[in-house]
Image: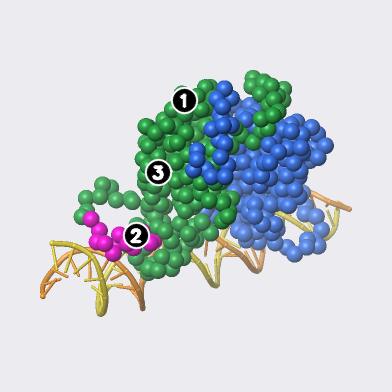
Chain colours: A green, B blue, C orange, D yellow
Amino acid sequence: MQSSFEPERPLRADAQHSIARILEAAEKVFVADPRASLEDVARAAGVARTTVHRRFVSRDDLHDALVATVNRRLREALDKAEVATAPPLVALYQLTVVTLELKVDWRASWQLVDFDSTGARGIDPSAIADLDLLLRRSRDAGLLQPDVDAEWARGIYLALIHEASARRRASESASQSAYRVMKTLLVGLGNPEHDLESLLSRPANGRDL
Amino acid sequence: MQSSFEPERPLRADAQHSIARILEAAEKVFVADPRASLEDVARAAGVARTTVHRRFVSRDDLHDALVATVNRRLREALDKAEVATAPPLVALYQLTVVTLELKVDWRASWQLVDFDSTGARGIDPSAIADLDLLLRRSRDAGLLQPDVDAEWARGIYLALIHEASARRRASESASQSAYRVMKTLLVGLGNPEHDLESLLSRPANGRDL
DNA sequence: CTTAACTGCATCAATTATGTTGCAGTTAAT
DNA sequence: ATTAACTGCAACATAATTGATGCAGTTAAG
């Protein structure tokens, strides 16, 4: 929210309920069309358009709130997975399951998150830190390649989750999707029978492939 | 474009030039803000707003044209890579290099493409067919796992390219990025020293991880 | 129960985006 | 060189969106 430092008393229960409904409706509507009007959002939320404006100063404010929602849920997911203490593979798997659901349910809001900033639209830096911690622990446990690039690993992990959530079929359970992601992350799609390591042995100059 | 079946004579050279500049400007502007107005686009293109409207009936029409541009370039990339005849690994690598550039230069337009449709905003079905052909050839050549899911493989490949293009650094050359993508696609990020195959041995139920 | 908060509705204001038209000047194509 | 096409500019029209306000009725909270 845009308000400087929230000095106000807590909102009444029905107001909080309105906010929740508006956020959920905004997510639904913006998935279908990011350019949808706030009136569309209000209609989907079952509230009057003025209520949307009362709760969110502007469209930007609403966007900020959606990003905040994603950040909050991501934080919960990280905490739930116990990234700092659980065995890396277990934590990675748990995190994958929950984050998959988060990306399925909050796809449009997720896209509003700016992974390169820490402002109102930025990603929670502690979330990135926790994710990196988990990946580092995975590497140190011998799970990931010792020389793996941290940013690339993080990006790939999130990209795989994104992809899995995008083409998640009704027939596939969350755990199956998570399994897919983990397997692709760790061993890729290559045939283990084939000696791919030698085929890919020229990191200095990719032209040699 | 929206026009039903283009019965008109070819456009004059300067008009074609305007169209090209507008499309490039639209790409630039929409990367920064998908909600930007057509006036912003016109300004960036160095033409009058009315010219934009003359060349593109509506905002939707402009979007269609951007999608068409992506489809055209993708087609060129596939042809250039000789996906049907070149050795799979070579073709895959060539395609990766060119598609990486395409995604870097036309990021916003790429996002307008609907991979699940074949309409005006849909992806060129022949492009998907060619990509699938290449992946099938790769699988048959023993490069990919024999039981790999076609849709998943295609999605992952594009997701990796997307990720690589998103965090492509100035310091990294196109071929280096392509190498990264290929390696991750084929062997993942897992440590080959570690017996990951056995860790990941329960495809039926991911919970057993 | 009392009160303050919240909502819906109607209304108004201001801005912005979209799209069209006419005209004068310029430019590509034959 | 002639002509048709194209562009910029100004002007106009319209619609959509955003945002604010007042008021009456309802509801949560003490």
- Name the residue that disc number 3 marks: A77
Mark 2 or mark 1, earlier in chain: 2
- Can residue B206 be spotted in the picture? yes
Mark 2 or mark 3, earlier in chain: 2
Q: Chain of mark 3?
A: A
Name the spot of residue B178 as percent of width and height, x first. Answer: 65, 31
- Name the residue that disc number 1 marks: A141
Q: Chain of mark 1?
A: A
Distance of label 3 from label 1 (alpha carbons): 22 Å
Amino acid at pointer 1: Ala
Name the spot of residue B157 as percent of width and height, x first. Answer: 64, 39
Does mark 1 fall on the same chain as mark 3? yes
Does mark 3 fall on the same chain as mark 2? yes
Viewport quadrant of the C terminus of chain A: top right
Mark 2 or 3: in front is 3
- Name the residue that disc number 2 marks: A19
Magenta extent:
A10-22
Amino acid at pointer 3: Ala
Q: Give the vertical position of B94 relative to C18 (above or below).
A: above
Towards the viewer: A77 or B40: A77
